[in-house]
Image: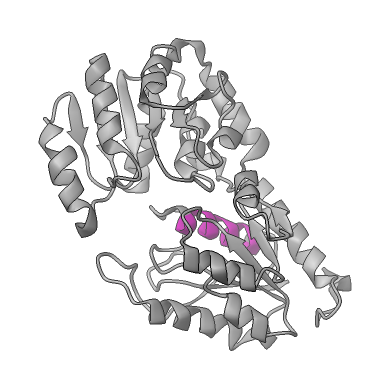
Amino acid sequence: MKIAIVSKLWESTDPHSTGGTGLSVGLLADELVKRGHKVTVFGTGDSKTKAKLISVRQSPWENDYSEPIEYLNIAQAFSQHNKFDIIHCHVEYKAAMFADLVKTTPHLMSIRYGQLFADEIKILKKYRQLNWSTNSGAMTKLLPFIKFQGVVYNGLDLKRYPFNKNKNDYLLFLARLSPQKGPDTAISIAKKLGRKLILAGKIVDSDKPFLTKKVLKQIDGRQIQYVGEVKFTEKIKLLKNASALIYPNIVFEACSNAILEAQACGTPVIAFDKGSNKELILNNKTGFVVKNSTQMAEAIKRLNEIDPQNCRQHIIKKFSVENMANGYEKLYLKLLKKPGAHKNIADY
């Protein structure tokens, strides 16, 4: 198949990306190329992919942002729609207007993010007849007015996640240091239990007032450490050696790669019951899904009940890159068989 993949400009699109969408879409693109498909990625110019790359911006957004440039990136794909058998977009609602105007080339619109505003919901409702997919069952319940073509979970290239059953005595917080992700809650729990905590993740200007008040003054470099936004190699080192990944996220979570990555390394995860977290964690077997910080603290005391091998096997069984690519291939073929598809799929 000739597949166009439209990615976000918030992060590079490649298997080493620090961003969730960039990582998942990068893995998908490379796996599809490996399977013999002709793939074109529309993403940032610094993306590293086995697919052909077309970009309108060299690097990801940091503290700057231009929504018109995001739309320009999407327009690049749809303006060339006759070159592709299918266009697969990973930009939530933003490609809906383009897809609605292009009737001859099938599209798939993947919703990968759970924090949707009222105006965004309005757009999704208007274009609910388009071909939508998402990455968790929780998202289908969040958006019940959409008849999703299917659910495809994020997947990992498990060769890049070494299993380790011997853990060091620290807890890990791996996410952007923002109010929504709960770094202040992680710190409070670690101090209550007298546990070492390592915080890893990016800081953006808009979060600095919160961090100044709630987080930065509690980082002492000993019990509470901050190591910045880490590259992939350092991230894996932190994940595989942590006694647990704690995930006190207070917002709806679509499908967290960090939760999957930790378990792939044999590291249990303790997360709030938000969004899809209970779909990704086998409660009491690969970690704990809890309701509040008190329960999270109690769960940390029970980490010796979790077998690291169970964590690894759970990811192998359900969340591999092969499973992810299989899921999307099935959706592509399903859509190419629908009336109005302009290609003959007999050769696929």
Residue at 52% over, 73% down:
94
- 243 horizontally vs 62: left or right: right
- The residue lying toward the viewer, choosing from 283 and 114, is 114
**In this view of the protein, can residue 49 be seen by the observer?**
no
Residue 188 located left or right of residue 315:
left
- In this view, the residue in front, 8 or 238, is 8
Q: Quadrant of the C terminus?
A: bottom right
Q: Quadrant of residue 347?
A: bottom right
Magenta-colored stretch includes residue 252 = no
The quarter holding residue 251 reads top left
Residue 205 placed where, x, y %? 20, 58
Magenta span includes 25: yes
| Structure colour scheme | one colour
The magenta-colored residue range is: 21-33
Q: Residue at x 59, y 50 (%)?
A: 142
- The residue at the point 57 percent across, 81 percent down is 77
Q: Is residue 257 above or below residue 31?
A: above
Image quarter in which the N terminus is found: bottom right
| Nearer to me, 222 or 161 | 222
The picture places residue 243, in percent across and down from the top left corner, at 38, 21
Seen in the picture, residue 95 relative to 28 is either above or below; the reply is below
Is 191 drawn above or below residue 77 in the view shown? above
Answer with left or right where residue 316 lies relative to residue 218: right
Residue 187 image point, x, y percent = 24, 29
310 left or right of 146 in image: left
